[in-house]
Amino acid sequence: MDKEIQLSFSYPTNVIFKRGATKELSEILKQHDFGKSCLLVTGSNFARKTGYLDLLKNELRKINCETYVYDNVEPNPSIETVESGAMLASKMNVNFILAFGGGSVIDAAKAITLVYSSGKRIQNFLGDMSVSINTIPLVALPTTAGTGSEVSKYSVLTDVKQKKKLAIGGPALFPKLSILDPDTLITLPPNFVASTGIDALSHALESFFSKNSTVFSDVLSKESTRIILNNLPRAFGGDSEAKMWMMYASMLAGLSINITSTNVIHALGYYLTMHYGIPHGLANAMFLVNALEYEESFLTERFAELSEALGHSSPDNVVKSRLLLKDISLLLDALRIPRNLKEIGVKEDEIYSLVEEVTQNYSRNLLNSPIDLNREKLIEICKNAYVGRF
Ligand SMILES: [Fe+2]
């Protein structure tokens, strides 16, 4: 026996995955005792425009729940957004928080829940990856398929002044209840499907190629990768069944990064989001193939293992690994993702300051990489990403 199995996990979130579940919110909430006053956290557009805001308020009214709406959450939510959301929760003395939106909304709602429940400033939690205080219940209703935040113990916020992503993690950040309703994805535009879908793929792949991976996280990350490669192009084309599979796959990937966390692709992607306003998933996509290609030379057997799980066969591990990288590259082409950093305006001599900043701000992510990624190695990955994927 060459490897002992060693696992330690618990999973506190009650998950419901059902098409149309949003319309049954009152019935679902009747099964729980979350209280009669709720802060509904959402973005400024989607919920109102699609009629979901009225639907949710109506469902909460049916169970005599008073609802206060906080619809100020922007993409890449700031710490100020969290603080003012928590102030409203406090003023209205709410019993629970309902997050309706994409990863930004759910991440902001998690942080609002922490601040409101603890009575402390958000600064007390930033960078702490094992927050375990008691909080009021958080109900998450995702409207994108990618972030996995609805099943994860992470919240990622933005320090606007310092242009820096700040993470919080730990058991206190798990939603109490997550309702995954594929109907919420029906009107999701193709560019959002692509960006959020690639975020989910990044989670699955970074999890599989993490030094923290386990036999259990492998099950989640392999299956998530397989489903995404098979369904994301159709979801991008608007197919609602494929969108449902993407919602399921992003949930699996979210569960997987609870075990492993993310690593180099997220670390590099954060820079593009902070400096170029590139959406999170798209920012990851700009490094995905080149970072994996670099790691592949150190981890050929591991790459071959995933490739085989996706149906590729060859007696040569290098051939199998290349087939996996080719699949990913073709997927990005199908989603019309820019092929190199040049196309999005990054200058070649910026790579050095990019790597400096990433090493300084996101070493937590880099440390999860299975290979030791020093500055020289990161510069090589970025130079390859500047030239472009194959
Ligand atoms: Fe992500």
Image (spheres, helix red, strand yellow):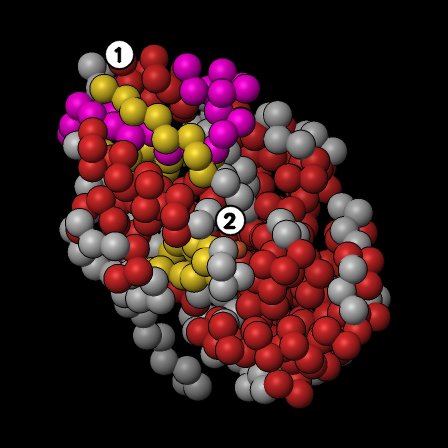
The percent position of residue 57, horizontal first and vertical second, equals 34, 17
- Left or right side of 245 for 254: left
Q: Which residue is mark 2?
A: 76
Mark with earlier residue (1, 2) = 1
Q: Residue at x 40, y 24 (%)?
A: 21
Q: Which quadrant of the figure contains the N terminus? A: bottom left
On whether residue 28 falls in the magenta region, the answer is yes
Front-most of residues 308 and 152 = 152
Is residue 320 positioned above or below 133 on the image? below
Q: Are marks 1 and 2 in contact (CB under 8 Å)?
A: no
Q: Nearer the viewer, residue 24 or 106?
A: 106
Relative to 59, does residue 290 appear above or below in the rendering?
Answer: below
In the image, residue 95 lies in the stretch drawn in magenta? no
Residue 261 figure quarter: bottom left
Between marks 1 and 2, how big is the CA–CA gap?
A: 33 Å
| Badge number at residue 62 | 1
Residue neighbourhood size for the residue with mark 1, other residues' Cα within 10 Å, grouped as few (<14), some (14–19), many (≥20): few
- Amino acid carrying label 1: it is Lys
Q: Which residues are magenta?
A: 27-54
Quadrant of the frame with the C terminus: bottom right
Q: Position of residue 294 (x, y in %)?
A: 70, 78
Quarter of the image where one finds residue 276: bottom right
User: x, y (%) of residue 284?
Assistant: 63, 59
Please give the name of the residue rendered at 45% of the width and 58% of the height, measured from the top-left corner. 159
x, y percentage for residue 364?
44, 74
Residue 189: image tag? none
The answer to whether 21 appears left or right of 130 in the picture is right
Inspect this view and state whether residue 255 appears.
Answer: no
For the point 48% across and 24% down, the residue is 47
